[in-house]
Amino acid sequence: MERKAGSECHPRDMKTSQSSSLPVVPLKQEYLLQLEAELNNSSSMTQPVGIGPQGLRTVSPPPSLTSVSTKQSSSSSPRNPSDSAYRARTLFRAGIHVDVTDPRQVQSHIDFTLEETPPATLATINNLASKLQRESMDLTAAQAGATEWTDLIYEILKEMKSTDVMVARNRGIDSNMKTPQVFDWRPDLKPEVRQPFISIPQKRQRDQMRDKTSEDSHVPAGPEAPAPSTQLADSPLLGRSQESTSASQLLLGPLSLKNPRPDISVGLSDQAFALALRSTHRDGADFFLNDLQETGLLISDPGVTPLGLRFPFLLIEAKSGATGGNLYQAQNQAAVGGASAINILNKVFLASETPSLNAVGSDVTLLTFSTAIEGPICVLWAHFWDVDEQNYCMANVGVWRTTHAYSAFDFVSKISRVLNWGTGKLKDTIVERLTSV
């Protein structure tokens, strides 16, 4: 095929022609608004800048982030971290530590609690232990889910408790509505999470954005037209966008603890406190805790919707390996619930202006318990406040497999002792503080 003279173009000329045809973006408010929207939608830490199809600056994630597999990113993300990331990052920043070695003073209080005489008779404990072992064998064979295991523990607690104890079952069926009830605890009971310090990443990002803007802009700078990098850097729109897309926020987001929602909460009854407070508060004893709660002076019922119990001291978090749950997840949930229960107790001593439970010389420690369950495996934990380190701590007390007869008996016996401690020493200490409120 013949070519006409002058029809050929040198590749260098073609490249120059193509690059010169790229659109020039005027620095108008409407484009800055679009740039702000693009930056807000970005989800990467470092953001190479290019020219989009409409002449707008676009943001692309770095190769180090795009190379991560889709499966991994879907299982653990800033908004939905993995269980291990949640414990290592969020719980740590909230000052919650799982599986610690308890100090000698705390251990002595735990030992004292577990040596309490159980409220149930030996015959009752034997009967409940036999029931627990028998039904644990059945549920294990049936590959039962967490709901069935929670129901079993709930029945054991109901048959073991005294009249001073209240047991609240989460996700129970309402007798009128015939629908599951879900009871979240109040979010203001959770420990505060220390957020990352982000001023340095923000400054670094502003510097990088200025450099990119100066390199990529085609707007000529002159006496009557300030340099584009200066215009963009001084723009309040871009300033807000830079703050919202800082490196720490993009990777972590605001760190927050999940609201406690124990499968079973065990606390003290209103009637137990009303009887104990009548000597000091007389006719107002029946409404005393309600008055404190409604005025915000003291939160004793943890539920957003009232649970009907006061000062929870034992929590149950149940999972089933047959349906994808595990002990690690249950322990994470129990850690936040236990820390929140510690905060409730601590408010009693702040309101009464008396020394903390963990003060030197005190005969009581700021202590609560939880049980993490995965099928027939039950793990008892003690939660306490470490005064020296200013942390919420969670120490292991024991592990049982309830398909074994002796293990089922020992577990029921330990839980019975925790209930007795709650209605005895713990209740008496709380009442003593409430009389000075």
Image (spheres, rainbow, N blue to C red):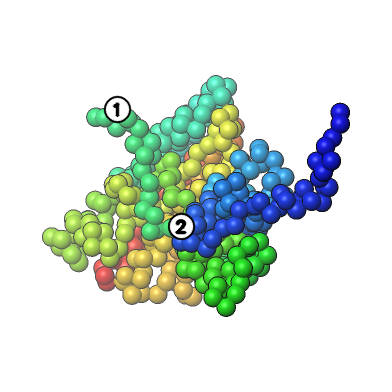
Q: Residues within 10 Å of mark 2 (few under 14, many from 20)?
A: few
Disc ID at residue 277: none
Q: Looking at the image, which is closer to me, 83 or 399?
A: 83
Looking at the rendered image, the quarter that the C terminus falls into is bottom left
Looking at the rendered image, the quarter that the N terminus falls into is top right
Task: Judge left or right: residue 130 versus residue 69.
Answer: left
Question: Identity of the amino acid at label 1?
Answer: Lys
Residue at (86, 31) in percent of width and height: 2
Q: Residues within 10 Å of mark 1 (few under 14, many from 20)?
A: few
Task: Judge left or right: residue 154 versus residue 374.
Answer: left
Q: Are marks 1 and 2 in contact (CB under 8 Å)?
A: no
x, y percent for residue 268: 33, 51
Residue at (84, 35) in percent of width and height: 3
The answer to whether residue 84 is visible is: yes
**Element at badge 2?**
helix
Residue 136 lies, with reference to residue 330, above or below; the image says: above
Name the image quarter holding residue 363: bottom left
Residue at (40, 33) in percent of width and height: 155
Q: Nearer the viewer, mark 1 or mark 2?
A: 2
Q: Earlier in the sequence, mark 1 or mark 2?
A: 2
Question: Identity of the amino acid at label 2?
Answer: Glu
- In the picture of the structure, the residue carrying the numbered disc 2 is 30
**Element at badge 1?**
loop
Task: Judge left or right: residue 73 versus residue 161.
Answer: right
Q: Looking at the image, which is closer to me, 190 or 40?
A: 40
Residue 309 lies, with reference to residue 389, above or below; the image says: above
Q: Looking at the image, which is closer to me, 412 or 248?
A: 248
x, y percent for residue 394: 55, 56
Disc ID at residue 178: 1
The residue at the far left in this view is 283
